[in-house]
Image (cartoon, helix red, strand yellow):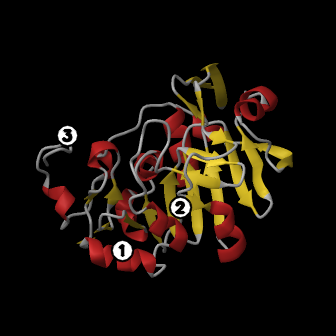
Amino acid sequence: MAGTDNPFDPAYLGGQRPDPSILPRLPLGPDKVIARRAAAEVRTGRTSIFGFGASSDAPLVMAENGFFDGGRIDDYQFTTEHGPFGGVVMSGWQFSANMGPEALLDGLQQFDFIDGGNCPFAALAFAQVDSNCNVNVSWFGSSNPGAGGFIDIAQNAQDLVFTGTFTTGGLNCELSDGGLTINKEGSVRKLVKVAEQVTYPIRTGVTERGQSALVITERAVFRVEPQGLALIEVAKGVDVRRDILGQMEFEPHRIADPLRFMDAALFAP
């Protein structure tokens, strides 16, 4: 498979159920914590669509945790904007090709499917989320990757999960004792006052379209509410004032009381 860092593999073309034991495993770190927490929102019996980045790691951690053993992959309906349907969404350079797909749709058919509201759950990455709950993945810093299918997917889903590290640019974390220690903070904040570009207005979707939305990071989970961003979970070992509020360019509209710890299993080896 040219450009995918992978030789030809007929498992990407369908006709056989993927063997969870041969799927790659993510190294333990912030991305795996995020993927595990995003995977907790995935349900059987509804089509789930995944975007590039941290969100596409969720199916792999589900495979590692035994969710697909005994042929139970058939209980899930996974896809991406590129048209593979069924099987396991892959990450990294293999993203856009599912392992063991049931069908391969062309672009026009796939976007008809997406725009028709047939992907009720979407897990997508974020580069920035701002004080008005706008998400940016299309233009930030010196990067201008564009929106791709992000807008179609986000607008037509019912339940949204946006995944990414809290900061970037040198972030170094240690996972232990069911929680997280930040050894070095990233130099770039991702929860900003004003996003450099609005790719999708999440709060508008929540208030006007009845969507639900979570923002999941390695140290905190937020819910998008009509009034703004609400902090609902934090990692054990994290100082809320220093490591969360101090690394945001705005205050969340609400901090849950009581404020729950993120599940300790998310940080386990």
Q: Please name which of the two marks, 3 or 2, marks the residue nearer to the observer.
A: 3
Query: Considering depth in this image, is 75 or 29 the residue closer to the camera?
Result: 29
Q: Please name which of the two marks, 1 or 3, marks the residue nearer to the observer.
A: 1
Q: What is the number of the mark on residue 111?
A: 1
Q: Amino acid at mark 3?
A: Asp
| Left or right position of 88 against 220 | left
Query: Sequence-wise, which precedes: disc 1 or disc 3?
Result: 3
Q: Classify 107 as above or below 95.
A: below
Q: Residue at x 26, y 57 (%)?
A: 97
| Left or right position of 168 against 112 | right
Q: Please name which of the two marks, 1 or 2, marks the residue nearer to the observer.
A: 1
- The residue tagged with tag 1: helix, strand or loop? helix
- Residue 179: image quadrant is top right
- The residue tagged with tag 3: helix, strand or loop? loop
Residue 113 in the image: state x and y as whole percent: 38, 78
Query: Sequence-wise, which precedes: disc 3 or disc 2?
Result: 3
Q: What is the number of the mark on residue 42?
A: 2
C-alpha gap between disc 1 and disc 3: 27 Å
